[in-house]
Image: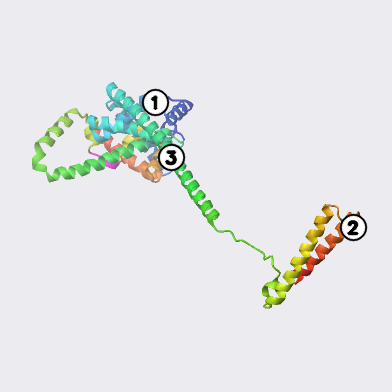
Amino acid sequence: MAESDDLAQVITGCKRGDDECFSRLVDEYAGRCYGYFCRLTGDRSVSDDLLSELFVKLVEKIGSYKGGRFESWLFKVASNIFHDWLRDKQRRRRLLELQKDKIESETTGTKRSDSEKVDNLQRQLGKLDADTRELIMLRFYSQVSFKEMAEMRSEPIGTTLSKLHRGLKKLRELME
Amino acid sequence: MNGRNDENLKELFEKFLNSEQAERAADDIQKAEQILSDNPAPLPDDILLADIKTEIAGALVRSKINVFRRRVYRTAAVAAAVIILAVISVKVFEKGGDEPQRVITASMIPAAIWESGDFTEDDAEIAMLAAEIEQIESEMLALRLGEDGGNGDIAVTELEMELIETNSDFWKG
């Protein structure tokens, strides 16, 4: 779906409620969105849920897409979904801390199984701060320009460039 | 709007750094992004994608039902508003119809007689009028029956004149 005319037709179909067009969007963008969620959460099961949530949300939100680069809009929605999940996770973590003794064995088990699955890149990404990690993933998976990223994050382009440069440089050092 | 493949990183960095630093920064980014490309994230499995498509189909059906419901509710609300307006209008018009109409009546009796306190004089005038009317009636009857000796037209005209005169005299009081 590289042709913008083709994408425009698909989006028009989605706005009409054509499920075939939605299927084409899933086929085109599911991989990149899944990678974005996976690298940010480090958990495939959570990424499965977030990916489902993203595409189901598209059904109700597609009407609000008013043009511009579709990837910018799509990843903005994805980013909101990720942040909602993050807030929910933090809330649950606070609740868990209250019942720490009761569930300690359960969380240790989860951590171990997660760590078995993650690759080296995931581990090194975990050493970056959350904002930088998200910026790197947004840049890599959404494939939008720095200008668009700056607009998405409502910050000056110089700030986006500087944060991403520092983050990627650090990641490169960690990976070497 | 161009994507990242169309942007010149060095040019972008040169807005904030000198040429040498900009080239190095652009190189840092490209090399780091190569690491990301070399370590791809897992892909969603086919079952997940099939589930998502099924969920989308369900969401579309729900969305269409909701749109239909909204239309029904809107139509019902409009219909209810129209009915209420119609009922209110009918009631308002009915109220208007119930209002007693003002009846304007005029007295047949001249004001001079009506306002007069002299009953004897008024009665005499009325008695005279009644006698004249009776006389005219009998003359009219005679004319109709052809008892006036042949000049019926003149007699009728005279009679009418007399009647008008009597009438106006009376109403003048």
Q: Residues within 10 Å of mark 1 (few under 14, many from 20)?
A: many
- Residue B60 at what x, y percent from top left? 37, 29
Q: What is the distance, in whole Å, between disc 3 and disc 2 at their CAs?
A: 81 Å
- Residue B67 at what x, y percent from top left? 41, 35
Q: Secondary structure at mark 2?
A: helix
Kindly identify which numbered label has been placed on residue B76.
3
Residues A158 and B74: in front is B74
Confirm whether circles 3 and 2 share one chain: yes
Q: Amino acid at mark 1?
A: Asp
Q: How many marks?
A: 3
Quarter of the image with the C terminus of chain A is top left
Please give the chain letter of the residue carrying mark 3: B
Please give the chain letter of the residue carrying mark 1: A
Task: Decide if residue B88 is on the left or right side of residue A82.
Answer: right
Task: Decide if residue A59 is on the left or right side of residue A68.
Answer: left
Kindly identify which numbered label has been placed on residue B46.
none
Residue B27 shows in this picture: no
Q: What is the distance, in whole Å, between disc 2 and disc 1 at their CAs?
A: 105 Å
> Which residue is label 1 attached to?
A19
Kindly identify which numbered label has been placed on residue B154.
2
In the image, residue B92 sits, relative to residue A40, either above or below, namely below
The quarter of the displayed image where residue B148 is located? bottom right
Instruction: Characterize the magenta stretch by its predominant secondary structure.
Output: loop
Q: What is the distance, in whole Å, between disc 1 and disc 3 at their CAs?
A: 30 Å
Residues B51 and A113: in front is B51
Q: Earlier in the sequence, mark 3 or mark 2?
A: 3
Q: Which residues are magenta?
A: A127-131
Q: Are marks 3 and 2 in contact (CB under 8 Å)?
A: no
Residue at 21 percent across and 33 percent down: it is A123
